[in-house]
Image: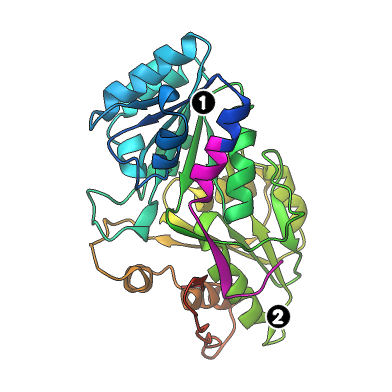
Amino acid sequence: MHDAPYATVLKPYGRALVELARTREDILCLSGDLSRQCEVDIFQDAIPQRFIHAGMAEANMMSMAGSLARQGFVPFVHTFGVFATRRPFDQIVNAIAYPNLPVKIVGFMPGVSTPGGPSHQAIEDVALMRSLPNMTVIDVADSHEIAQAVRAVAEVPGPVYMRLKRGEIPTIFDDDHVLSLDRVHVLATGSDVTLLSSGMMLPATLQAAAALREHGLSVGVINVPVLKPFDGRGVLDAIHDCPAVVTVENHTIVGGLGSAVAETIAEDGLGTRLRRVGIPDTFAEGAKSGPFLFEKYGLSTQHIVNAAWTALRHEGPPPAVTTVAVAPGEYAPV
């Protein structure tokens, strides 16, 4: 695993989808008028005969994808996360999830990774899609996982929702990293506190773990790329002897990773103290700076450290996090 700051890869999703489609003629690409922003302008240029521009009509696009899936195709549907879930939710239920069709819905710019404010910030997309029967929900962390996820979700027999950061994607894992859709990825075990992270929050989680270890704590880190079906057994095995757990997500604390872990702990009767780092129960404002929003809504590396510190009931101020210097083309924790 690499250290921060991380080298970045541009548009790994778009390239991986084209590579897959060249080997499978059943793969179709649908775009909701955001082709360049969702990296599928690459697909449109490379395989135009299997590219469908559905326009700014997301509900119709989901119904269209369901119909195409009934004809034996595997449609990949693309738009921003908020337009891929909240706006066409009824069509996803009736045209895709209920008939259990192999439509792959890809939502970009999750949570407060966009400056667009409440109309563009998908802060509840995991909660919505996690509630649907038959739906697989994925939130991957780096360029290697994205490339592997494209092929993996194509093999899932039913519908999938995958949320992705767009643009420059960090390379966190080594080349031999293998994404699993069945098991959580335990990066380290700890006897004091375990941090569980999904998606683009992994760099900040790793940085928080390093800061806590510098103060003598034994810190576990678990990467959770699949939020449904949730590997509760894997989580319990990793945290069973750990007195405190912190979940970290770029999503509302209602209904996402924090809720999945809370449900798992409660149903097992495990007496573990839990803190949830995520967007509080509020709509977020827009801003030109992503780090400003992460700081304002409690998603920074320092907030993760603070949550772990309070979960362990330590007295005194929590450790201060050192800012990671970033060169052009690199990605650092928030």
Pick the front one: 35 or 201 = 35
Q: Is residue 127 visible?
A: no
Which one is closest to the eye, mark 1 or mark 2?
1
Q: Residues within 10 Å of mark 1 (few under 14, many from 20)?
A: many
Give how far across and how far down residue 261 sits, in percent.
58, 50
Cα distance between the residues tagged 1 and 2: 41 Å
- Whether 17 is among the magenta residues is yes
Give how far across and how far down residue 165 sits, in percent.
45, 53
Q: Is residue 232 left or right of residue 332?
A: right
- Whether 256 is among the magenta residues is no
Pick the front one: 98 or 114 = 114
> What residue range appears in magenta?
1-18
Dot 1: what SS? loop
Which residue is located at x 37 percent, y 74 percent? 295
Quadrant showing the N terminus: bottom right
User: Can you say whether 200 is above or below 25 in the image?
Assistant: below
**Residue of label 1:** 159
Q: Is residue 287 left or right of residue 261?
A: left
Q: Is residue 328 visible?
A: yes
Give how far across and how far down residue 270 sits, in percent.
68, 53
Q: Amino acid at mark 1?
A: Pro
First reached walking from the N terminus: tag 1 or tag 2: 1
Which residue is located at x 56 percent, y 22 percent? 158
Of the numbered discs in the image, which one, if any, rests on residue 281? none
**Residue of label 2:** 217
Pick the front one: 101 or 73 = 73
Q: Residues within 10 Å of mark 2 (few under 14, many from 20)?
A: some
Q: Quadrant of residue 220?
A: bottom right
Q: Amino acid at mark 2?
A: Leu
Give how far across and how far down residue 285 sits, in percent.
23, 62
